[in-house]
Image (cartoon, coloured by chain):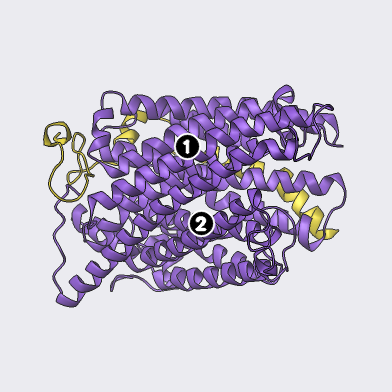
Chain colours: A yellow, B purple
Amino acid sequence: MTVVWILFVSSVIVLPAAALLALRWAVRHGEFKNLQKTALSIFDEEEPVGRMTDRFPGPQRSSKSSQP
Amino acid sequence: MSATSPSILQALSPSDTEDVAQRRALLAEIDASCRGTLMLFFGAALVWLLIGTVFALIASWKMHSPDFLADIPWLTFGRVRPAHLNAVVFGFASEAAIAVTLWLICRLCRAPLMHGWVVNIAGVFWNIGVAIGIGGILAGHSTAIEWLEIPGYATPLLFVSYALIAIWGIITFRFRREKHLYVSQWYLLAALFWFPWLYSAAQILLIMEPVRGVVQATVNWWFAHNVLGLWFTPIGIGAIYYFIPKVLGIPVYKYSLSVIGFWSLALFYNWNGMHHLVGGPLPAWLITVSIVASVMMTIPVVTVGLNHHFTMWGSFHKLKDSPVLRFMVFGGMSYTVTSLHGVLLALRSVSEVTHFTHSTIAHAHQGMYAFFTMVMFGAIYYIVPRIIQVEWPSARLISIHFWASAIGIMLYIVPLIIGGTLQGVAMINPDVPFLDPNKYSVVTMTVPYLRVRSVSGFIILVGHLAFATSFIWIVARWIKAARQHQPTPIVSNV
């Protein structure tokens, strides 16, 4: 039964505590500030906003609609 | 592994990270560091996908033609059906999820995968574990616990392999050069923590020190439901949050909604599962808690749905240009539909009719295939050309794959939801017999729907074969290019 109690304690105390710590870390490190800037973080000079980064292989099917 | 990677001990400390001046060179380094590992996982995932699809077809055919392969013990329904489930869940879906997670963590952290050989070894042992597990199920050693049928002698291999993979993902995260987290990282990292918790809790409570009675059913449903909601769902949503904006070149519509979506998923999802036992001998409050949590799941589902839809707003015409977008948008829309459908199914008045029917099977496939698998297909189509620097060989094959998968799964889900609901109505009607071949009965009324399911399975198989052909073809091109030391230039805008 020991292992079941370890599991119970970890599920009831450790996991919620870990979630709260993660939330605290996020607040302290400004993860919830300037959210729109974060939304842009997946773009860079090579793959900027406004450029599609995937197309069917081969000749372009619909160049008018797929060009940024 | 790049030549300049630090040792394993050095890798445990983030103080030794180096700045890389050229962002493009860094991206190339990241993709190169993941190449072998990801191709191993994607290749193995594809093999399990095909094996799992064949098992699915056999199981499906047996539902309306019980004599089919009935004299082969290891292909009886009780073995081949869990073999299908474990092949697609732990063979295909988990391996695709791990590979996509590792690549996204590396990309978003702007950090290469260090010492990828460790993950490769873990991947090999994971596959050995899945193979032993499925072999054990076919041999009759199943635990008979849904979603945990793999026999006990194979699970340690899976757990240790997974632990190594997750630790490597977290080490990569610690070495991140991009300090601010994108929402996908929240989802992916959370999934890496949640899965071992779910899996070990279920193993302890159901296999190692098994609980008895209704607690067993409770833990089983909690695990089966949460492995979808806290392992596959966050990875699927995290992938969509990256790939749709990235492919379109448009930032996500409202980033704040994504934050609300993540934390509400973390708060509400793990209470789910027991609503599947409405009418069972469980304490009423336990079922009610799950129903309430299911209804509360509307919050993350609506936030994610709004964000995906409005990010796509004005760009739907681009679906005809991008294969990745097609799969991602189909997966994203399916997530919204399946989740809201799940909320509906959790309600007592609805569940009393639909549970223990084929409607639940349709719902599970809506989540695992129409949502998650389609997202993984899209991610694979995006990632593979980048890591091996070779273009997909045939647009036609990709189109066949998409349409066969999309039409196939819709032909699976819709009739089975209708048939399952009618089955539920029949089951609670005392005037309808359970089995009578000469008149309307619970068993015979489902047969037409089950036949349609088999047809849909064949259509899905066609899609998977097109995908396999594409994958083998691109790997052959990659090997040929590597031999010539001259990568094939990628025509599309990657």
The residue nearer to you, when weighing B458 against B221, is B458
The structure residue drawn at horizontal position 16% and vertical position 66%, both measured from the top left corner, is: B487
Q: Residue furthest bottom?
A: B483
Any mark on residue B410, and which? Answer: 1
**Residue B367 in which image quadrant:** top right
Chain letter of the residue beneath label 1 in the structure image:
B
Picture coordinates of residue B254 (x, y %)? 38, 25
Q: Residues within 10 Å of mark 1 (few under 14, many from 20)?
A: some
Picture coordinates of residue B147 (x, y %)? 66, 53
The structure residue drawn at horizontal position 50% and vertical position 25%, both measured from the top left corner, is: B302
Q: Is residue B110 above or below residue A68?
A: below
Q: Residue furthest front?
A: B438
Picture coordinates of residue B478 (x, y %)? 24, 68
Amino acid at dot 2? Thr
Q: Is residue A23 left or right of residue B344?
A: left
Discs 2, 1 touching: Cβ within 8 Å: no
Q: Is residue B12 above or below residue B308?
A: below
User: For the residues marked 2 and 1, what is the alpha-carbon distance in whole angstroms?
Assistant: 16 Å
The residue nearer to you, when weighing B243 against B127, is B127
Picture coordinates of residue B413 (x, y %)? 54, 37
What residue would you read off at disc 2? B53
Q: Earlier in the sequence, mark 2 or mark 1?
A: 2
